[in-house]
Image (spheres, rainbow, N blue to C red):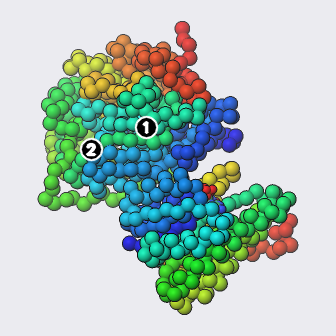
């Protein structure tokens, strides 16, 4: 301890931070409260911004807390330590006929991280967030006490910790419900989507019949093509006559930082164009393995390095649905006019299942997520303009993806933040937290 | 499905190796001194697919228990195919220099307990005329250095002991594998600043399983340590003694 290291980053690689690193080895270990420095748990650093950073202070690395504790094969209830990754869970449970109740767009996250951000997936419209499937967990606080938390026991800590951004203490293990599947495949359909109106139609039409929906959109398309993209929907496949071969495990890894000209406006445009035109017919149905369906980006390891040394921002907001007149239209217009967006734009409808966490991000509406290469002031100003629209429309921005929202924005987006603050462990903090609770004019 | 005795089962390297075995459905008898941690490891291996996991808590400095460990493992799994010895401590060199009692404890942990455990294990396999013995030694045993020669000489003695044992057991078909890891990021090295040569224990675990499949004699993990240590061993003592390593 007491050596500062810059080797633990956030996924967007902005901002940079240096930390005192402390690795947890066993769930019986204690947490280092005697250094006088604030503490923050850190899983796999798949949060884009500073919610997983604690500049100048202590990071508690949880990835060695990676033991399974129990799997009940009849009920599908899994208990494991908080540093177990979703990838590892899949490698154990899929063959036994189980799947994650909710999964984010990468399987390289820890269970602790999934709880602390109350993550959502392509099934949010019907199934809600990850936190809804959590039965209980153990929370170690700086007072040395291990709190068993569930919807009925230490209920307040339970609700504060789900979506609690690692600030309420260290989650030691989690018990949650898996869902049954017949095989590792999905019955998927991809539909070309000409514009935003069609996106709304497809979302509505798919809501009941498809467990998973998401759209990839080209955010440089304008005018009548605004919102052009591909709508993807799917269900777990039932019994299959003939199984397609599983995808290979091989991963391309981006070995070094790319020079940033690789991601200039023109290459982004070219990528968007290819993405839309790759699919020639308007509708394609196929049986696909769950890996390419849920985790298309995982095939390229460390793709965040493509954005070069300055890193990038991701912006994810949720705004009310309001059908065709949704504020999402204005947001998309602002982005397409700026020409600064990237190839990664995801649009999805959130359902009305309540999220259990005090600070959980998902709520009924429509959510947009996309990357912005860090071009300094211009990028920050654009994102602030987007924030103005989101604020005016009673929306919210996802802390897991954020590195720049103002304290004023945060406090508007999360009106229960003061209620949450009561449960923040006195020895815990993060770069994000210090930024968003700062008093403002 | 192999029957495996794993001594020092709570070691980070041992845990990662056992995970590979669990996925293959192997049966394991685990020995470690911390009961709570041992049961966490056992639970993990059961979920991952080990067909049988039995545990025994033992302080390995208690040499009286060694025979019993081996007998119990053979009884619990009705025989043994493979043994891995993975316990060890990286004591503070300076303390051992100042106080022989501390140095002696290091030798007991890192060398003598191995000799004591390997005696009944070798005799069992010799009688069976088959089996595999895997022992984790270290690159530190390849040359004495001022910064850790107590640990290093214990590991060096261990490597030599294994050489002789391999020679003895070769004719009856028993493989003896000496594993020499370089720098591994585990609790043992928690206090050391991590340079680029450090690897995760999973890397060493995969190397151990590969060495078992190929019945190798001595493996350096990762492989480049074989060449690094070759260079270090070749340096003339007149130069080496002046260096601060
Ligand atoms: C390609 C990609 C796609 C993504 N897609 C989605 C998506 O579809 N939906 C979605 O919701 N998110 C998505 N995310 C975000 C990601 O799911 C979250 O940021 C997740 O929390 C990351 O988990 P982690 O293990 O990497 O945690 P980290 O990023 O290391 O930490 C995240 C937070 O969890 C806290 N934490 C970690 N472990 C513990 C613990 N044991 N106890 C207490 N607190 C802890 C940390 O303090 C921090 O606040 C995506 C990220 C990437 C890179
Ligand atoms: N890490 C490296 O860089 C490195 C390099 C070369 C070789 N090695 C060797 O690799 C092996 C595994 O070490 P590791 O790196 O995995 O470190 P580790 O996680 O610290 O494992 C060491 C294990 O030995 C156990 N142990 C020590 N003394 C014991 C005793 N008297 N009785 C019972 N158990 C005892 C410890 O138990 P407790 O947890 O209960 O203390 C611990 O489980 C060791 O032989 C080590 O010398 C390591």
Residue A301 horizontal side relative to residue A188, left or right:
right
Which is nearer the eye, A420 or B237?
A420
Q: What label sits on residue A137 in the rendered view?
A: 1
Q: How many marks?
A: 2
Q: Is residue A85 visible?
A: no
Q: What label sits on residue A179 in the rendered view?
A: 2
Against A123, residue B52 (above or below) is: below
Which is nearer the eye, B109 or B175?
B109
Identity of the residue drawn at 40% across and 65% down: B52
Identity of the residue drawn at 65% across and 51% down: B190
Against A305, residue B131 (above or below) is: below
Q: CA distance from mark 1 to mark 2?
A: 19 Å
Q: Residues within 10 Å of mark 1 (few under 14, many from 20)?
A: many
In the rendered image, residue A171, in percent from the top left (x then y), is placed at 48, 37
In the rendered image, residue A144, in percent from the top left (x then y), is placed at 58, 35
In the rendered image, residue B71, in percent from the top left (x then y), is placed at 52, 75
Q: Quadrant of residue A173?
A: top left
Residue A213 horizontal side relative to residue A440, left or right:
left
Residue at the farthest top position: A441
Q: Quadrant of residue A321?
A: top left
Identity of the residue drawn at 28% across and 23% down: A364
Identity of the residue drawn at 32% across and 33% down: A132
Against B197, residue A282 (above or below) is: above
Which is nearer the eye, A403 or A350?
A350
Q: Quadrant of ligand 1?
A: top left
Residue B97 horizontal side relative to residue A104, left or right:
right
Circle 1 marks a residue in which chain?
A
Circle 2 marks a residue in which chain?
A
Q: Helix or strand or loop: what does disc 1 sit on?
A: strand
């Amino acid at each position: 301890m007491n050596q500062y290291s810059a080797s633990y980053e956030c996924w967007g690689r902005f901002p940079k931070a240096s930390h005192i690193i402390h690795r947890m080895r066993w769930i019986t270990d204690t947490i280092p409260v005697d250094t006088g420095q604030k503490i923050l748990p850190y899983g796999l650093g798949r949060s884009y911004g500073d919610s997983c950073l604690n500049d100048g202070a202590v990071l508690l690395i949880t990835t060695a807390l990676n033991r399974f504790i129990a799997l009940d094969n009849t009920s599908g209830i899994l208990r494991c330590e908080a540093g177990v990754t979703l990838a590892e869970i899949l490698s154990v449970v899929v063959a036994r006929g189980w799947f994650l109740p909710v999964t984010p767009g990468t399987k390289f996250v820890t269970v602790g991280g999934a709880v602390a951000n109350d993550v959502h997936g392509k099934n949010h419209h019907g199934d809600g967030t990850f936190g809804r499937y959590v039965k209980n967990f153990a929370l170690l606080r700086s007072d040395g006490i291990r709190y068993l938390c569930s919807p009925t026991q230490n209920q307040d800590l339970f609700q504060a910790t789900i979506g609690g951004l690692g600030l309420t203490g260290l989650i030691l293990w989690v018990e949650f419900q898996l869902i049954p599947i017949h095989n590792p495949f999905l019955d998927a359909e991809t539909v070309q989507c000409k514009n935003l109106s069609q996106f709304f139609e497809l979302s509505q039409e798919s809501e009941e019949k498809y467990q998973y929906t998401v759209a990839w959109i080209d955010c440089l398309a304008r005018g009548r093509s605004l919102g052009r993209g591909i709508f993807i929907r799917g269900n777990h496949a039932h019994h299959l006559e003939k199984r397609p071969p599983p995808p290979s495990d091989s991963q391309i890894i981006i070995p070094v930082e790319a020079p940033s000209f690789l991601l200039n406006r023109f290459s982004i445009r070219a990528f968007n164009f290819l993405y839309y035109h790759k699919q020639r017919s308007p509708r394609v149905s196929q049986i696909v393995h769950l890996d390419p369906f849920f985790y298309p980006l995982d095939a390229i390891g460390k793709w965040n390095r493509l954005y070069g040394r300055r890193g990038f921002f991701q912006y994810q907001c949720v705004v009310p649905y309001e059908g065709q007149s949704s504020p999402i239209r204005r947001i998309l217009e602002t982005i397409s006019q700026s020409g600064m967006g990237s190839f990664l734009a995801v649009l999805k409808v959130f359902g009305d299942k309540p999220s259990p966490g005090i600070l959980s991000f998902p709520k009924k509406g429509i959510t947009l997520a996309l990357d912005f290469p860090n071009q300094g002031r211009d990028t920050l100003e654009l994102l602030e303009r987007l924030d103005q629209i989101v604020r005016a429309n009673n929306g919210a921005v996802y802390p897991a993806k954020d590195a720049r929202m103002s304290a004023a924005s945060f406090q508007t987006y999360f009106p229960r933040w003061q209620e949450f603050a009561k449960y923040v462990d006195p020895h815990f903090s993060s770069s994000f937290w210090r930024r968003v609770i700062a008093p403002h004019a | 499905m192999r029957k495996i005795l794993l001594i020092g089962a709570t070691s980070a390297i041992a845990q990662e190796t056992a995970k590979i075995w669990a996925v293959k459905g192997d049966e394991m008898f685990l020995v470690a001194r911390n009961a709570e941690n041992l049961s966490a490891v056992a639970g993990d291996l059961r979920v991952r697919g080990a067909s049988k996991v039995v545990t025994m808590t033992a302080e390995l400095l208690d040499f009286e228990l060694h025979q019993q460990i081996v007998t119990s493992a053979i009884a619990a799994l009705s025989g043994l195919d493979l043994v891995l010895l993975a316990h060890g401590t990286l004591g503070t060199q300076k303390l051992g220099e100042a106080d022989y009692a501390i140095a002696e404890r290091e030798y007991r942990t890192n060398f003598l307990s191995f000799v004591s455990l390997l005696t009944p294990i070798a005799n069992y396999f010799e009688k069976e005329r088959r089996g595999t013995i895997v022992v984790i030694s270290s690159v530190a045993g390849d040359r004495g250095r001022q910064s850790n020669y107590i640990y290093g000489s214990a590991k060096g003695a261990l490597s030599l002991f294994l050489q002789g044992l391999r020679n003895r057991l070769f004719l009856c078909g028993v493989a003896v594998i000496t594993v020499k890891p370089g720098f591994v990021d585990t609790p043992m090295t928690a206090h050391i600043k991590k340079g680029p040569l450090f690897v995760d224990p999973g890397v060493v675990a995969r190397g151990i399983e590969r060495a078992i499949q190929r019945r190798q004699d001595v493996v350096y993990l990762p492989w480049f340590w074989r060449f690094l240590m070759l260079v270090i061993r070749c340096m003339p003592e007149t130069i080496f003694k002046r260096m601060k390593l």
